[in-house]
């Protein structure tokens, strides 16, 4: 995520906090923000999350999701990738993320992540490429 994206997210979070602080009451009904299908690094966990792979790497390096959520990996690169949980080569940290080989243009959903924890992921075919590494935080 570049500095501009971080600044935009920080500004949005500040405005959201200000809006919540100024509400001061209501009927007691719970409210929740709209899910962000693209995931993200912080804030409220979402119920769906997509990580897109391109020639530049993964677009969401740090995703926060709710317990029981699945992650969808989309391969928009021209070569295949095999997204797997850490550590390489055993992939035992979060086996739910071990989705197998994704050919160009394919998408695949992980198994539901049912335990609160943080799981690192990488491309098994390119384990040292940091642009293809990230984490999923399950809350």
Image: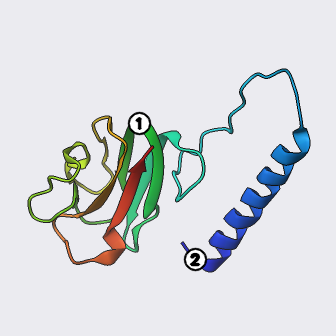
If the image is split into quadrants, where does the N terminus sit? bottom right
Q: CA distance from mark 2 to mark 1?
A: 28 Å
Q: Which residue is mark 2?
A: 2
Q: Quadrant of residue 115?
A: top left
Q: Which mark is residue 23?
A: none
Describe residue 6's horizontal placement relative to residue 102 as left or right: right
Residue 17 in view here: yes
Q: Which residue is mark 1?
A: 67
Residue positioned 62% across, 79% down in the render: 3
Crowding at dot 1, Cα within 10 Å, few <14 / some 14-19 / many 20+, comes out as some
Residue 69 lies, with reference to residue 20, above or below; the image says above
Residue 53 lies, with reference to residue 116, above or below; the image says below
Q: Secondary structure at mark 1?
A: strand
Residue 76 in view here: no
Describe residue 130's horizontal placement relative to residue 28 as left or right: left
Point out residue 112 in the picture as x, y percentages from the top left corner. 32, 34
């Amino acid at each position: 995520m570049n500095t501009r994206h971080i600044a935009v997210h920080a500004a949005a979070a500040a405005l959201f906090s200000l809006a919540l602080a100024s509400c001061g009451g209501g009927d007691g009904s719970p409210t929740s923000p709209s899910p962000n299908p693209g995931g993200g690094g912080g804030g409220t966990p979402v119920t769906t999350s997509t990580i897109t792979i391109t020639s530049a790497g993964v677009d969401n390096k740090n995703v926060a999701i709710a317990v029981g959520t699945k992650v969808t990996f989309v391969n928009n690169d021209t070569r295949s990738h095999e997204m797997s949980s850490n550590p390489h080569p055993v992939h035992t940290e979060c086996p739910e993320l071990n989705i197998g080989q994704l050919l160009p243009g394919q998408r695949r959903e992980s198994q539901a992540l049912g335990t609160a924890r943080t799981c690192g992921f990488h491309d098994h075919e390119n384990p040292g490429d940091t642009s293809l590494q990230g984490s999923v935080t399950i809350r």
